Amino acid sequence: MGKCGEGYCQICGEYKVLSFEHVPPRGAYNDTPVAAIPMPIDSVASLASELDGPPIPGYVSNKGSGTCTLCTDCNNFTGGSYGGYFVDAVKQIYQAVYSKKISVVFKDNRLQIPLHDIVPARILKQIIAMFASIYSSSGKLFAEDHRELSDYLLSLDAQGWAGEHAFFMYFQKSGYARLISNVYVTKEEPSEELLCKIDSAINTGSNTISEFAFGFLGYIWARGDSIAIVKSSSYRFLDITDWRKEQEKRDLILSLPSLTTFPPQLPMTYAL
């Protein structure tokens, strides 16, 4: 059965042998041990007290960041179909920012990063696959709540989905890795007042935001009314939703806001 055992796959929804899914892919600088600390956000006040108190129990993954939430078939399909394109783009970004051999323009707290011969649609699908892997929604699967996105992932030629979904990207210049799934936000910027209400913080409805950041890149997935909230943010995240239409190789310049993540782990909150 493998070390992950059996369970329901987040993408196809079937009960199968599960495999360890690197999130992000191992080739995207995710091949060293990582320490993880669960940081619940059902109450900002209680989380703040936990951070000031005794250490929160965590765990170490020697494989890198990842989860046992995808079946072997879906893991192999998404990794083989999209993972390589994603890794290539991430490596280009890393080389551009840190090698100093490529011209990167920093203006108005944004990085202008040139990329060459990338396939935007395949990169977007890998990002959605990562959100599927880390999905958490009151015990329900990604495949149950968002079948339209599962079908999109499982079809190489699919160029879109039903329903309101938007995806965004930013550069994580420093800070903590971030894994946030399904936070309900009703204001232009997440507020302590809102998120201190336990019944309002996590919501399985359509108007939610998820955020994932690791290494030097961060991604946001917004649904329903939350799309307008992200688009109106002062951080001006890069909207990559329309990458779904771009199936051929091309050159482009990413314009990414440069942000620092920090606890408490609330979506769209960054150090000044």
Image (cartoon, helix red, strand yellow):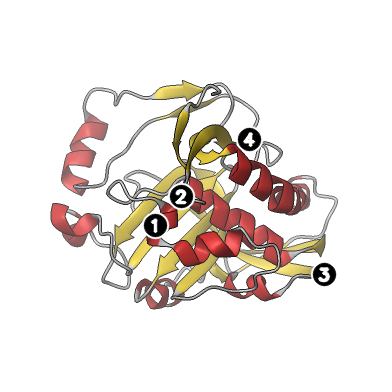
- Callout 3: helix, strand or loop? strand
Residue matched to label 1: 144
Residue 183 placed where, x, y %?
31, 57
- Callout 1: helix, strand or loop? helix
> What's the distance in space between the residues labelled 3 and 4, CA to CA?
26 Å
- For marks 3 and 2, the one nearer the N-term is 2
- For marks 3 and 4, the one nearer the N-term is 4
> What's the distance in space between the residues labelled 2 and 4, CA to CA?
26 Å
Residue matched to label 3: 250
Select label 3 or label 1 by which is in front. Answer: 1
- Callout 4: helix, strand or loop? loop
> What's the distance in space between the residues labelled 1 and 2, CA to CA?
7 Å
> What's the distance in space between the residues labelled 3 and 1, CA to CA?
34 Å
Residue 23 picture quarter: top right
Three-letter code, disc 3: Arg
Three-letter code, disc 1: Glu
- For marks 1 and 2, the one nearer the N-term is 2
Q: Residues within 10 Å of mark 3 (few under 14, many from 20)?
A: few
Rendered residue at 70%/60% (across/down): 122
Contact between marks 3 and 4 (CB within 8 A): the answer is no
Contact between marks 2 and 4 (CB within 8 A): the answer is no
Rendered residue at 54%/24% (across/down): 1
Residue matched to label 4: 30
